[in-house]
Image: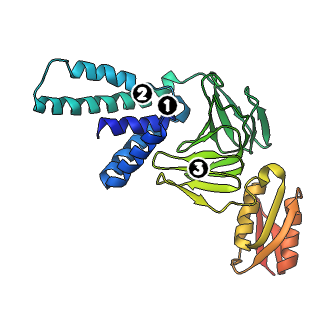
Amino acid sequence: MDEHYLLLIISDLKGTITEDEKIQLNNWLAETEKNRAECEYVINTWMKSGSAASLIQLDLKKDWDVVKEKIHPKKSMSLAWRSVAASIAILVAIGLFQFYITNSKEIQIASTSFESSAEIQEILLQDGSKVWLNRNSKIRIDDDFNTENRTVEIFGEGYFEIAEDTTKPFFVLTADSKTEVVGTVFNISTAENETTIHVEHGTVKFGGVLNELLLHHDMAAVLNPNGWANEIEADPNAIAWKTGKLVFKNESLTNVISEIQHFYQQDIIAKNDFSPLQLTSSFDNVPIELVLDEICLIHNLDYRTTVNGFELFKK
């Protein structure tokens, strides 16, 4: 791998890449499958660290410069030797990167974590930003938060109201994505190897290593396991877990059941094929039984409770 592009990949992972460098990286990735495979290798190595936030502090460029100074003496050398030395430099740099990842647990940055359980938890950050954690979610905040930048790492789902500060960008990291904001409100969720974001207002930069999207009011996107971020239709119930309100308009009953399961965190087993059925209704902070009662009344269905939740079936 060309050392220039390896540094670009790592700069992107650290959140320090410039707009021009991002264009260079994207153009290089589009050239060949080999380039994309090499990039994926670096990303996978990074993800093994278990802490994307810790990578931001890695100054690989500085370490690499030291290595290259030793390998590339200032005296002249043959073209063949320069080629060999360049290859060695790249291998050593990758080795340094892998060494850091492998030993990251021993050199973790000091941080503070907040974790929700069965209740939604509200957190006020040092800069005045607010975060609401959905149930069974976790956020990690570096102890140097609000010094040069503002970086947090989330596991699960969170709703963010970011205090505006143009001198200190706010970064939200997941296992495979990076979101950069200045002052905005958005929801981000990590589940099933995907990261989904919904912007309520303001503007955010969202993506992984392979591409980046600029999202505005009422826009949404998903970062797939293949590393590409794609814009998707905004879900009107993206923040229902926070507001307590569910809204459906000509929505297939199959999707409705999925939304209800996520909202109430209860299993609902459909015993029949309900895909032809649709629902138009809204629910504001009501028990799940009342939601199921209305669905059954509209479509002549019935339900029963089980050990893990509910079963929904035709009469």
Q: Distance between the residues labelled 3 and 2?
A: 31 Å
Query: Which residue is pictured at 63% across the width and 28% down the height?
Result: 167
Q: Which of the 4 image quadrants contains residue 278?
A: bottom right
Query: Which residue is pictured at 72% across the width and 57% down the height?
Result: 262
Q: Name the residue under label 3.
A: 214
Q: In this view, does 229 lie above or below 131?
A: below
Q: Which of the 4 image quadrants contains residue 111?
A: top right
Q: Counting other residues with Cα less than 10 Å from the Cα at mark 1, is it few (<14), some (14-19), or many (20 or more)?
A: many
Report if the CB atoms under discs 3 and 2 are less than 8 Å apart.
no
Q: In this view, does 250 lie above or below 7?
A: below
Report if the CB atoms under discs 1 and 2 are less than 8 Å apart.
yes
How many badges with numbers are in the image? 3
Q: Mark 1 points at which residue?
A: 55
Q: What element carries label 3?
A: strand
Q: How far apart are marks 1 and 2 (CA)?
A: 9 Å
State the image coordinates of residue 137 (x, y, percent, origin top left). Answer: 69, 42
Instruction: Give the amino acid type for the residue marked by disc 1 in the picture.
Output: Leu
**Quadrant where the image shows the N terminus:** top left
Instruction: Give the amino acid type for the residue marked by disc 3 in the picture.
Output: Leu
Q: Mark 2 points at which residue?
A: 100
State the image coordinates of residue 45 (x, y, percent, origin top left). Answer: 41, 39
Query: Which residue is pictured at 13% across the width and 21% down the height?
Result: 76
Instruction: Give the amino acid type for the residue marked by disc 2 in the picture.
Output: Tyr
**Quadrant where the image shows the C terminus:** bottom right
Along the line of sight, the residue nearer the viewer: 262 or 83: 83
Q: Is mark 2 on a helix, strand or loop?
A: helix
